[in-house]
Amino acid sequence: MTEPLAERLRPRSLDEYIGQQHLVGEGAVLRKMIEAGRIPSFIMWGPPGVGKTTLAQIIAHRLETPFYTLSAVTSGVKEVREVIERAQKGRFFNEASPILFIDEIHRFSKSQQDSLLGAVEKGIVTLIGATTENPSFEVIRPLLSRCQLYVLKSLEVADLQQLLSRAVSQDVVLKEKHIELKETSALIRYSGGDARKLLNILELVVNSATDEEIVITDAFVVQCLQQNPLAYDKDGEMHYDIISAFIKSIRGSDPDAALYWMARMIEGGEDPQFIARRMVISASEDIGLANPNALLLANAAFDTVMKIGWPEGRIPLAECAVYLATSPKSNSAYLGIDAALALVRQTGNQPVPLHLRNAPTKMMKDLGYSDGYRYPHDFAGHFTPQQYMPDALCNHRLWHAQHSPSEQKLYERMVNYWGKRYEE
């Protein structure tokens, strides 16, 4: 039986690996460690189909060290301990530690993760974990502190184009066919930055062609996928495309659509915590200061689902989804912190003005620390104008109010306090 295209094209070396140049490109941090022959335990966080499993296999091959794999879906504490014991017995003195690769490590329970701690800390195994979920939520703090964290990104258009070209020119099956990639926009759009999905779509399209000369166009791709709407998607469509539609429905103030996409996730067996967590993010990112109560309700819904479980948990989730969708919207805090981060990266470590520094010692007082600071509570309205930004940035505005009744009040207060600085 012929292997799927995605498996046939799986890279065997770093030179064949596509994407993630910030980690494995020439001179990048992870490539340097691999070439030096020693790597720390680390966790890769990124969407599906960006090369997490492949990278772990390449590392094990390059280091010529035993490679053990566990799936968090099918393995328990017993299996973890058995692998650790085999790794310990099979290791020779001064050899690199065997690699233990755990796919979907976010699905490991606390006890399963606890069972890894000793082996990772003593260097019995080098742990490489892969997760599509934020490790700060899903991985216990002691284990996370013992691992580096590397973020993998969705593949760029240029990466996907390179992958398509390699597939039709180098794959043992496809290179025997007469394939012309006349248009690739639809292939790339449907893939969503997922290499595996892209190759699955390409294979589906090629197998759907009846002519000896296969000309791939956007229209042909759309036609094939409409005939086989889920053939290329599997769990990825349910987990990522539908959550995207759900969040965008909330952002677009459509409670009917938000409930529909939530129902699709529930029927598909989605983890209710995943749904609740995304609503907490949406409450901050999309609603924000236009209705600060949204974040409180989203957190309450999250806590309630954790306490009461399923199926009753669907009710607070639905209540929260409708509330978020019908709330006024503002992303001013989201834009503000991104603007602040960009400014910090651009301007570096600007010194804190002396009057804002603490002066716990006489020497600091003599140097002018805290000199001239005005305590706002000593003034009418608990406010007095003074400089809080670094000297070089004192005229920069980062937060810009948006138009909602709640945020308008905040804006008017700032104009009252700061005058022309906040007049737009």
Image (cartoon, helix red, strand yellow):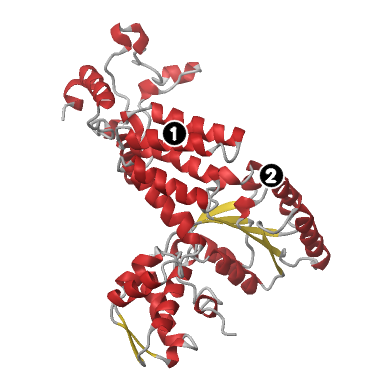
Residue 110's label in the rendered image is 2
Position of 249 compared to 88: left or right?
left
| Residue 292 in sight here | yes
* Residue nearer the viewer, 89 or 348: 89
* Residue nearer the viewer, 417 or 274: 274
Indicate which disc, 2 or 1, sits on the residue closer to the N terminus.
2
* Residue nearer the viewer, 355 or 251: 251
Assign the C terminus to one quadrant of the image: top left
Mark 2 and mark 1 in contact? Answer it, CB < 8 Å.
Answer: no
Q: Secondary structure at mark 2?
A: helix
**Residue at mark 2 to residue at mark 1: CA–CA distance:** 30 Å
Assign the N terminus to one quadrant of the image: bottom right
State the count of labels: 2
Q: Name the residue located 63 percent from the left edge and 74 percent from the top edge.
A: 61
Q: Name the residue located 31 percent from the left edge and 40 percent from the top edge.
A: 253
Residue 20's label in the rendered image is none
Amino acid type at mark 2: Lys
Q: Secondary structure at mark 1?
A: helix
Residue 352 position within the rendered picture, expressed as x and y whole percent measured from the top left: 38, 29
> With respect to residue 226, does 424 lie above or below?
above
Q: Farthest right residue? A: 89
Q: Residues within 10 Å of mark 1 (few under 14, many from 20)?
A: some
Amino acid type at mark 1: Glu
Residue 319's label in the rendered image is 1
Q: Name the residue located 60 percent from the left edge and 51 percent from the top edge.
A: 106
Residue 128 position within the rendered picture, expressed as x and y whole percent measured from the top left: 63, 59
